[in-house]
Amino acid sequence: MNDCQEVDVTPFAYAMSLIGGKWKMHILFWLWKKEVLRYGELKKSLGQITHKMLSTQLKELECDDLLIRNEYPQVPPKVEYSLSEKGNTLMPVLNSLCRWGSEHRPDNK
């Protein structure tokens, strides 16, 4: 690659701004695998995530149109999360990461 050639980092930076961080890809993974999850189910699937972190990450993913939050007016409140159309377009990338991880994990020799 020519060092003088400019690199447009904008598309990569945009994508990483949506999925960067410790938990966002994990959240998207579980919604991909389970399709619809309630808040408690998602928290249980993620293990060590705090309530504050999960809440923040879900709000950011919803704001970025990667997931859909459905709230049902009942007592107790029921909220379900699923991937949006835009979120589903990331699943081939996530699938490639899963395949790469499967092929390269240390215990897969």
Image: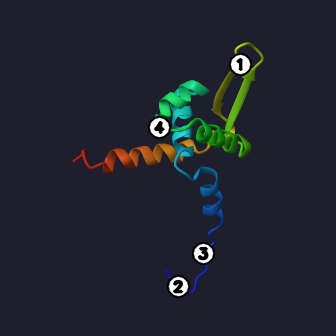
Q: Relative to 48, is 69 on the left or the right? A: right
Dot 2, crowdedness within 10 Å: few (<14), some or many (≥20)?
few
Identified at 47% across, 37% down, the residue is: 48
Q: Secondary structure at mark 2?
A: loop
Residue at mark 2 to residue at mark 3: CA–CA distance: 9 Å
Residue bearing the label numbered 4: 48
In the rendered structure, which disc, 4 or 1, sits on the residue that comes first in sequence? 4
> Which tag is nearer the camera, tag 2 or tag 1?
1
- The three-letter amino acid code for the residue at tag 1 is Pro
Kindly give the residue lying farthest to the left in the view shown: 109
> Which tag is nearer the camera, tag 3 or tag 1?
1
Residue bearing the label numbered 2: 3
Residue at mark 4 to residue at mark 2: CA–CA distance: 43 Å
- The three-letter amino acid code for the residue at tag 4 is Gln
Residue bearing the label numbered 1: 77
Residue bearing the label numbered 3: 7
Q: Secondary structure at mark 3?
A: loop
Q: Position of residue 74 (x, y in %)?
A: 75, 13
Residue at mark 3 to residue at mark 4: CA–CA distance: 38 Å
Q: Does residue 36 show up? A: no
Residue at mark 3 to residue at mark 1: CA–CA distance: 48 Å
> Which tag is nearer the camera, tag 3 or tag 4?
4
In the rendered structure, which disc, 4 or 2, sits on the residue that comes first in sequence? 2
In the rendered structure, which disc, 3 or 4, sits on the residue that comes first in sequence? 3
Residue at mark 4 to residue at mark 1: CA–CA distance: 24 Å
